[in-house]
Amino acid sequence: MIGIFDSGIGGLTVVREVMEKLPQYRIVYFGDTARTPYGTKSQKTIVEYAIEDTEFLLSQGAKIIIVACNSASSAAFGALKERFAIPIFEVIRPGVEKTLQLTRKQRVGVIGTRATIGSGIYERLLKEARAGLQVFSQACPLLVPLVEEGWLKRPETKRIVRKYLFTLKMKQVDTLVLGCTHYPLLKPIIKAKMGRRVEVIDSSQEVALWVKGYLEKNPEIGGSLTPAGKENGHRFFVSDLTPNFEHIASQFLGRPIRLELA
Ligand code: DGL
């Protein structure tokens, strides 16, 4: 099985892409809804949580792991790679690679949680790969709760998005990285605010393409994964379950979903 985890339900945007690009494999998902958000927590705490999340997915039969959370990717990827001897993917490097391909003016904007932006990881990786590239970052702590409330098209959300994006627009970035797996749900209003000329990078899509490429190059790993059955057999676990989660989770996934308490 492909194991995918996030601090909550944002990682379902990654699940949606993996289902589309790798429909032949079964997925087990874990959303740490009892402890979300991770983006406001310390690195030490995020590392502890990410290790527990990974252990849970392994206990469910996962053979590869996708960290579908930028906050956990930036804080805990190194610790996870050190601890677990299985293929582990994160959402930051795939987005960085795509950004380097698409930026023309070498002016890049990055939005994410406080943990992700505070870690400086996007800026570091982008600048390491291309000296001279300019990176402008903006933490957007209000967006995760708005998305989790399902306020995807409300005027309040549009106003907050406009405020967060204002500086990046003024800096005339030509590429904007959605550095949080919740943000693809706000892509229509983010795109509208940034304008047609700005490329918006969705790391959910990019990580799914990376995993696909990896499994094509490593067929023995693909062979060790459980194939999706007729009823696909995906399982979606959360650490806390309320009726509202199931409703919002279905919005993230774009189809009805049944959540199970881990
Ligand atoms: N989905 C998480 C991310 O990509 C954000 C939610 C959180 O702060 O836990 O960073």
Image: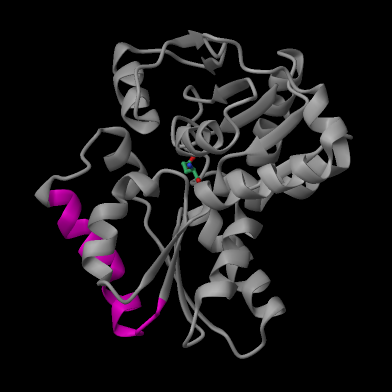
Image coords of residue 90 (percent x, y): 66, 47
Q: What's the residue at 22%, 42% (across, down)?
A: 152
> Does the magenta stretch mainly form a helix, a strand or a loop?
helix
* Rendered view: 240 above or below 185: above
| Residue 37 vs residue 171, the one in the foreground | 171
Q: Is residue 202 left or right of residue 171?
A: right
The foreground one among 232 and 3 is 232
Q: Which residues are magenta?
A: 156-174
Where the C terminus falls, by quadrant?
top right
Q: Residue 208's image quarter?
A: top right
Seen in the picture, residue 225 relative to 173 is either above or below; the reply is above
Instruction: Return the x and y of residue 52 as percentages of the image width and height.
Output: 70, 25
Expressed as whole percent of the image width and height from the top left, the position of residue 36 reads: 47, 32
Quadrant that contains the N terminus:
top right
State the residue at coordinates (81%, 25%). 223
The answer to whether 143 is drawn above or below residue 37 in the figure is below
Q: Position of residue 190 (x, y in %)?
A: 28, 60
Residue displayed at 63% across by 20% down: 26
In the image, residue 170 lies in the stretch drawn in magenta: yes
